[in-house]
């Protein structure tokens, strides 16, 4: 009888513990990152009345039940969106790591939580809701003064010491001088030319590249010729175009000018000025010039030269119509060491069927530039010649004594060299000239504007200069047996000997980064809610309530039996 009384009374306490667990779960149904508790039971060693034999089963009387464990259920809670960029949730396994406020400075210890409702305090520390410091790794300055996270290639864990995350040193970033300009552009290799400019002198420009002042092709052919007289028609000089000129023939504009200079003599100067063939009379008498067709006319060319048919007075000049060439200008910018922005143009002019000259200029005339001219060649299918080297120009800006070097990256590659794709940067297709992409690596100084956190736990700062830089990384802890963690309040857990092998605990090998070693992803502007299911909790509450009532009935029944036994004496 007494045995039944004690068995039932002990079970009352265990049933009450179960209800306590359920009440705590229900109370934390809206607690961020809360993990519910489940009580489990096991029976107590039974009293053996008779041992089992070959023909008889053992006779045993149970002595009741006892509390076996209170398990922390670590399954994922519901993820809800928020408007706070420093709110984070773990999708998958792992815990955010915070500094234990009771730990020593030289021997830090940590607490762990799934509640990612973090904020920055007045001193720029990233803190949990209770004010504990969130820990991770901070970026270090690179040679440009920019924050940079150095990570181990194997573990992806930053190589800097783990510490409380504080961003006070990352409120601004310095200016960076540009070192290169990269772009992707096409130079029109067809006949329908929309972008053109005046021909340059001494550019060795082939006549079959030249356009009239409307941008129309001259359509010059082998053998096309014309005549000029410099003495009013008494003596005529014939000029014949040939792709492979013999003596007295020409293929380029400069060759034609040289032939005309030879024929006109020292009393006049023939040159290319502002895209026009210009004749200047240096003598003291008039110069009577006439132009006419010869044996194989080119009407367009004759029209271009017709304005030369006139009398040139002493110290006066006459000129042809403007000769143009296909062109394209890549308009870009760069930054100096102080973060000042400057314009820079790379102008390409076609000189031969697959060859273009280029000139790099500063359109605002805010400095001087050296090593700024050259040429590029293409193959017949529009790809840049594989031997093309990207030039480096030297720029001396006004107010600065030291020149800065700027790579003009024609290949649009990392180092400005050919990397196996001849179409990666500059091309020559039969398409309109244009620049589809251009960038440079400099920037002005910047002030921090906002902070965000990505799925790898990187804390990224966005600055006023348009740069976004990783300034820190969250430490994510992962345990072999997370149910071995101990609750310490504030939705925090502390480590125990049952979460990992002793060597892992001592080396803090449980600390790592998101998306590595079984750890989940970090979701920004999200919070993981409690994993308590109210329907399940209320169902369990009814079950344990009935268990409590049944055990209470066992106590009263045992009491009545004892009372009856006492009354037998009377």
Image (cartoon, helix red, strand yellow):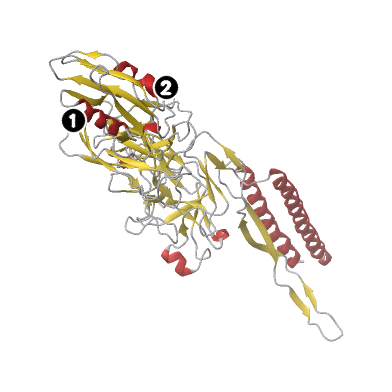
Residue 348, located in which quarter of the rendered image?
top left
Check if mark 1's residue and mark 2's residue have beta carbons within 8 Å.
no
Q: Which residue is mark 1?
A: 398
Crowd class of label 1 (few under 14; some 14 to 19; many from 20; radius 10 Å): few
Q: Is 140 situated above or below 81?
A: below
Callout count: 2
Left or right of 62 on screen, residue 360: left
Q: Position of residue 429 (x, y in %)?
A: 48, 38
Residue for point 32% across, 36% down: 358
Q: Residues within 10 Å of mark 2 (few under 14, many from 20)?
A: some
Determine whether, in the image, residue 418 is placed left or right of residue 317: right
For residue 402, above or below residue 560: above
Q: Tell which tag, 1 or 2, sits nearer the viewer.
A: 2
Q: Nearer the viewer, residue 335 or 43?
A: 335
Secondary structure under the numbered disc 2 in the rendered image: helix
Above/below status of 213 relative to 2:
above
**Distance in Å between CA atoms under marks 1 and 2:** 49 Å
Given the current orientation, which residue lies at the most extreme front position? 234
User: Which residue matches tag 2?
Assistant: 299
Judge whether 94 appears above or below 355 on screen: below
Viewer-side residue, 202 vs 433: 202
Q: Measured from the top left, where is residue 120 in percent x and y?
A: 40, 39
Residue plotted at (49% across, 35% down) = 430
Does residue 31 appear in the picture of this structure? yes
Residue placed farthest to the bottom in the image? 54
Residue 483, labelled with which disc?
Answer: none
Q: Position of residue 339 (x, y in %)?
A: 27, 34
In the rendering, at what x and y percent does residue 171 appear? 33, 37
Of callouts 1 and 2, the N-terminal one: 2
């Amino acid at each position: 009888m007494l045995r039944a009384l004690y068995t039932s009374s002990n079970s009352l306490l265990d049933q009450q513990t179960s209800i306590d667990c359920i009440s705590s779960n229900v109370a934390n149904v809206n607690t961020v990152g809360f993990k519910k508790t489940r009580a489990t039971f096991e029976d107590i060693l039974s009293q053996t009345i008779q041992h089992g034999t070959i023909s008889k089963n053992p006779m045993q009387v149970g002595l009741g039940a006892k509390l076996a464990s209170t398990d922390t259920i670590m399954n994922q809670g519901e993820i809800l969106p928020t408007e706070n960029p420093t709110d984070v949730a773990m999708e998958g396994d792992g815990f955010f790591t915070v500094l234990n406020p009771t730990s020593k400075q030289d021997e830090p210890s940590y607490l762990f939580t799934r509640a990612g409702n973090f904020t920055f305090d007045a001193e720029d520390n990233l803190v949990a809701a209770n004010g504990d410091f969130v820990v991770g790794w901070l970026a270090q300055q690179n040679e440009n003064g920019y924050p940079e996270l150095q990570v181990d290639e194997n573990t992806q864990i930053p190589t800097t010491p783990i510490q409380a995350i504080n961003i006070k040193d990352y409120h601004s970033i310095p200016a960076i001088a540009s070192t290169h300009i990269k772009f992707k552009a096409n130079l029109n290799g067809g006949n329908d030319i929309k972008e053109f400019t005046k021909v340059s002198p001494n550019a060795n420009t082939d006549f079959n590249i030249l356009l009239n002042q409307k941008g129309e092709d001259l359509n010059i052919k082998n053998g096309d010729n014309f005549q000029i007289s410099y003495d009013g028609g008494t003596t005529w000089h014939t000029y014949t175009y040939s792709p492979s000129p013999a003596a007295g023939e020409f293929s380029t504009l400069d060759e034609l000018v040289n032939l005309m200079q030879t024929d006109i003599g020292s009393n006049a100067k023939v040159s290319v000025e502002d895209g026009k063939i210009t004749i200047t009379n240096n003598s003291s008498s008039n110069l009577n010039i006439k132009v006419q067709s010869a044996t194989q006319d080119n009407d367009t060319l004759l029209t271009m030269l017709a304005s030369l048919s006139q009398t040139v007075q002493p110290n006066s000049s006459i000129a042809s119509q403007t000769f143009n060439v296909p062109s394209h200008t890549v308009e870009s910018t760069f930054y100096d060491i102080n973060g000042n922005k400057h314009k820079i143009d790379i102008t390409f002019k076609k000189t031969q069927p697959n060859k273009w000259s280029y000139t790099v200029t500063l359109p605002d005339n805010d400095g001087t530039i050296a090593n700024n001219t050259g040429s590029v060649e293409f193959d017949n299918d529009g790809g840049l010649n594989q031997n093309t080297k990207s030039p480096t120009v030297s720029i001396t800006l006004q107010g600065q004594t030291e020149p800065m070097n700027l790579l003009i990256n024609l290949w649009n590659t990392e180092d400005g060299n050919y990397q196996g794709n001849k179409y990666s940067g500059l091309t020559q297709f039969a398409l309109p000239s244009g620049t589809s992409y251009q960038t440079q690596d400099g920037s002005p100084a910047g002030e921090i504007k906002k902070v965000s956190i990505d799925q790898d736990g990187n804390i990224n700062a966005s600055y006023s200069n348009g740069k976004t830089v990783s300034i820190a990384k969250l430490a994510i802890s992962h345990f072999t047996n997370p149910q071995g963690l101990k609750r310490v309040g504030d939705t925090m857990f502390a480590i125990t000997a049952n979460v990992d092998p002793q060597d892992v605990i001592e080396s803090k090998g449980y600390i790592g980064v998101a998306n590595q070693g079984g750890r989940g992803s970090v979701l920004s502007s999200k919070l993981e809610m409690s994993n308590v299911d109210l329907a399940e909790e209320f169902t369990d509450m009814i079950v344990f309530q009935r268990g409590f009532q049944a055990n209470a009935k066992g106590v009263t029944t045992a009491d009545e039996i004892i009372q009856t036994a006492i009354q037998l004496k009377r």
